[in-house]
Structure formats: structure tokens, C-alpha cells
Image: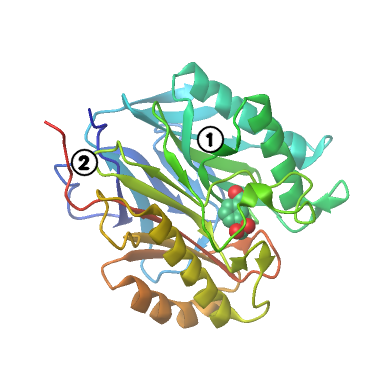
Amino acid sequence: MDAAPLILDYIAQNPTSSPSALAPHILATIGFGNTHDRDPADPANLTVGLRQLNPTGLQEQWRTSMAPSSGWQNGVGFVATRDLVFAHLLAEESGANGLADTAFRAYLNLLTFLRNRGFRHLLRMWNFVPTVHELDQGIERYQAFCIGRAHAFSHAGIGAGAFPAATAIGSSAPGLLIYAFAARRPGIPIENPRQVSAYRYPTRYSPRPPAFARALKAPWLKTSGLFISGTASVRGHRSMHAGNLSAQLQETLANLDAIAAASSAPSLPADALPRYLKVYLRHPVEMTDVAPVLTDWSGSETKTIYLRGEICRRELELEIEGYNYAHTAHSHP
Ligand code: 3EB
């Protein structure tokens, strides 16, 4: 049987129209602000500490057809249905043991929660790493984060074939913020033929490689969701076009095209281009250069959120992620 739909919508701060009948129940509403913030009154509400560049503020809202239950456990906020869970954690940095240890403990905490609730399969994870380019015990903090994450995954017995789609972005907001979707059933990881799998990157980028898939498809969702990881100007394992934003954008779009081609499934629109995009820009002024090219590529129906954020590698100017789902829900009678 199909699992319920998972719908993404980018909505205004004070929406005037009501959610669609197909997916009236809110799993997550993610806004953007100066600091990371979680709403004690409702674990569905999350604020990510990144500045939004869209002239009218948009929020990222995930919805489904089943009424969820929500709560808090051990610092994990969650909203769960029969099939799916949205879960998040904000880990304060303790100082003494560094970010690798903070990331390890945060991941272990989250993975333990998910396992105990029966949501063993990670679909999609977002990571916001404070001061990602600074040094932490002699290595870049992004690398320290990768070490902690890799350690937790191997501790939990999660190997390359089970890595989620992911985004990792630097923020000036304090605390390591992680939010995720996980499910009772596994997704299908998708790699990009133009890129070395991140988990096979040479160790010069990080002593333990980044643990994520380029995309992940959940064909059993009633909407056949496709999660596209943060995608940047990386070919093979190398950063391309340092210092050249428009060339980096073209390279990133070529990567997104390649991921879409690699993920094509009968249940998704043939071109599998994302209907929802999120763009992280190192330099906010560059939005005026990026937006027209991106809209040309995606079509004007594709909704896009622009955020100011630091991409893990210093030489990368932008990163783009996406979500796509089938327009018409399919079902097997
Ligand atoms: C890259 O392709 C760019 O460490 O989870 C993109 C998406 C990137 C996710 C992660 C890193 C991550 O390597 C950086």
C-alpha cells in the first residue's frame, strides 16, 4: 500500500489560503531568522538562523494527509505519522571536546530516537554548522562535523547504501541545528554520474568523508517524493570555477540535470525537475545574478527560497537543493 503523500509548499508568513485537501496536516513549518529557534509549544515550528533574501518572506511547509502526533524526547522535537517523522535537534557546543564530539552526540541522540520509534530509514537531513570555516582542534569545523557524523553513522550501523540526502550549511547562529525526515521504509539513494560520491571523496576534503547521497527517492510515498541534496559546483571531487559565480551556477545546474536524469521514474514527471528549490548564497548581492538564470532553467512555476549561507568549501559561492513530487497522486487499488 502507498504511504500518505508528502507535500512541500513555500508559504507566506501569514497565509490567506488554507492548505489543500490532499495534505491538510502540517508536519513542519520552517522559517528563517537571526537565530535558530524551536517552538516549545509546537515541535512542527522551526526557525533556521539564516537570513532570507526573498523580498517577501517565505516559509517551508511540509504537509501530509494523516493527522500526526508530536512531542519532545531527550531534546528531540518530533512530529510523526504512521509512515513518516519530522525530527530536529539543536545541540549547544560544550567547548571541551570540540565540534566532532558535539556532532557525534547529536547524531547518536537523533538516531537512537528514530530507531526506538521504528523510523529506521533516514530520507533527508539538513545540518546548520556554526562558523563552518573556523578551526576546531586544528581542522576546519566542517571537517570536524563530518568526523562526528561519520562516527555516529558507523556506530549505528548505517552504511553508504543507507545515507540520506542532505544539506550542510554554515551559519553564524550558535548551536548545531539538525532537522530530518525519516520513515519506516527505506528510500532509494541516487548518485550523480558527473560527481564522485561524497562518501568516496579523497581525505584531503575531510579525514572522514561527508555521509550523504546526492538525492533520495521515496517511490512508496503517495506523491513519489524526490529529495535533492545540496548541490554545488563540484565535478568529480573538485570544486570548479573558483571566484566565478555564473560559471558555478551553470556547473550546479548541470549537476541538477544529471541528478534528475539519474532519478527518472515513471511515477515522477519525465524531466523530474524540482518544483521547489532552495538556494544558499555566500554573497547576498549575487541573488540578482542568479535568480533570472535559475528561473529560466526551472520554469516560473518552480518556487524558490534564497538564503544567505556559507557553503562548506570556501571557494563555493552557491549551493542549490530541491524537492519534487508527482502532480497527480497515484494509487494501487
Ligand atoms: C559537495 O557537493 C558540497 O556534508 O552533508 C553538499 C550537501 C555539501 C551536503 C554534507 C555537503 C553536504 O560536497 C557540499
In the picture, measured across the screen, residue 225 lies left or right of residue 93, that is left
Q: Is residue 246 above or below residue 198?
A: below
Q: Inspect this view and state whether residue 314 appears.
A: yes
Residue 265: x percent and y percent?
Answer: 31, 50
Query: Quadrant of residue 26 in the image?
Result: top left
Q: Is residue 16 above or below residue 85?
A: below
* Residue plotted at (24% across, 39% down): 222
Query: Quadrant of residue 305 in the image?
Result: bottom left
Which corner quadrant of the figure contains ligand 1?
A: bottom right
**Front in this rendered view, residue 100 or 232:** 232
The residue singled out by tag 1 in the image is: 162
Q: Is mark 1 within 8 Å of ligand 1?
A: no
Q: Earlier in the sequence, mark 1 or mark 2?
A: 2
Q: Secondary structure at mark 1?
A: helix
Residues at circles 1 and 2 in contact by the CB criterion of under 8 Å: no
Residue 110: x percent and y percent?
Answer: 56, 28
- Quarter holding the C terminus is top left
Kindly report which numbered mark, 1 or 2, lies closer to the viewer in this rendering: 1
Q: Residue furthest right?
A: 138
* Residue plotted at (30% across, 36% down): 220
Query: Quadrant of residue 169 in the image?
Result: bottom right
The amino acid at mark 2 is Ala
Q: Is residue 90 above or below residue 322?
A: above
Q: Is residue 113 above or below residue 122?
A: above
**Front in this rendered view, residue 87 or 297:** 297
The residue singled out by tag 2 in the image is: 23
Q: Inspect this view and state whether residue 169 appears.
A: no
**Front in this rendered view, residue 225 or 317:** 225
Residue 186: x percent and y percent?
Answer: 42, 32
Q: Residues within 10 Å of mark 1 (few under 14, many from 20)?
A: many
